[in-house]
Amino acid sequence: MTVIHENLLMFCFIVKLIEVCTSRNHRETIKNLTEFQKIHMALIFSVVLWGGMFVAYAYLLPTVSATEIITIRFVLVSISFLIVFVLVKKSRPKIPREKFGRLVLLAGIGIPGSQLPAIHSQNYLSPSLASVLVTTSPAWAAVLSGWILRERLRGIQIAGFAIAFGGAAIVITFGSGSGALSVDNPWGAALCLLAPFTWAVFNVLYKREFGNLDPFSTIGVCLIIGSFVMIPFYRSAARSLGEFSGSQWGWMIYTALAGTVLAYYLWYWALQRLEANKTMSYNYAVPISALLWSWLVMGILPSLISILGGVILIGGVYLTQTQRSVKRKGERLEIH
């Protein structure tokens, strides 16, 4: 694909995204949706945006390391949130003083802890196996939600988690034409599992401690804190900035603004209103989103078995959402 073609695709995507967000017709349509529909649309949109991150990394990794990409991404995200906080008074964080220390601890561990282990584990594991292990986050969240949030899991939901994980494994294993799922390095597998476990812990504790706060400002503070944790990598990341082409800068900005600021806001807005285990089940759909992005942007066609895996995955996610929600004590909203 030529650089001109890449830039054109990125430009068209940004224009369409702005159009969707600002169009009066789209605003009216969203306004008429039920709360239930808005929640699931927010989660689907988050998954779509996160799927595009894999394509972005494919274009960026030939030039810079994964750690440098994440460092630059967090810095851009932090700058974006700080600008909004300065210019828009209503968006400024209103975090109770007694909770701020817990937020710093949770974000300082949870944000980099859900990113770095998965990246470094790929020095020891095949990408296929690493991807399968990363998709275990909904299972971790289901266990933690029952223990910490007292969210009850029904039999059909447990079956849905298992079916969705099976579908995700099929999509990941055969989506790239590779079925290399053998564990050659148990330590690498353990390191990789640390990422989805940390992501699940972060989401469950975030819901318990900060679920009643504004998601935009609160997650903004979390990501700013996460960027401070990446300070040891600032120097090497800064040196790599001059190596980016125009299209790579486009993808880098996508990872920061669309894949992080917008996707995280939508995700945590939905997490406020839906049980953590149901929200986390949408993580299973990220691989199929990545496959669709690869097809649309890079021209990589998914195999028939990958499509079958996607159908199984969607069916499993649907099962996790079909049971009547069990309202926690003190919860603001119950979804049916």
Image (cartoon, grey):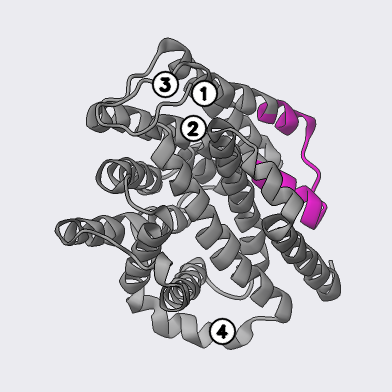
Callout 3: 10 Å neighbours few (<14), some, many (20+)? some
Q: Which residue matches tag 1?
A: 321
- Which residue is rendered at x = 40% and y = 81% of the image? 234
Which x, y percent locates residue 250? 68, 73
The amino acid sitting under disc 2 is Ser
Q: Where is residue 265 in the image (x, y as percent from the top left)?
A: 48, 54
Residue linked to disc 3:
325
Sequence order check, earlier mark of 3 and 2? 2
The residue under label 1 is which amino acid type?
A: Gln
- Circles 1 and 2 in contact, beta carbons < 8 Å: yes
Q: Where 118 sits versus 308, above or below?
A: below
Say whether disc 3 or disc 4 marks the residue closer to the N-terminus: 4
Location of residue 11 in the rendering, given as x and y in whole percent from the top left corner: 77, 69
Numbered mark located on residue 120 in the image: none
Q: Which residue shows up at 40% across the image and 53% down it? A: 215
User: Residue at label 4?
Assistant: 241
Location of the N terminus (image quadrant): bottom right
Which residue has dot 2 on it? 281
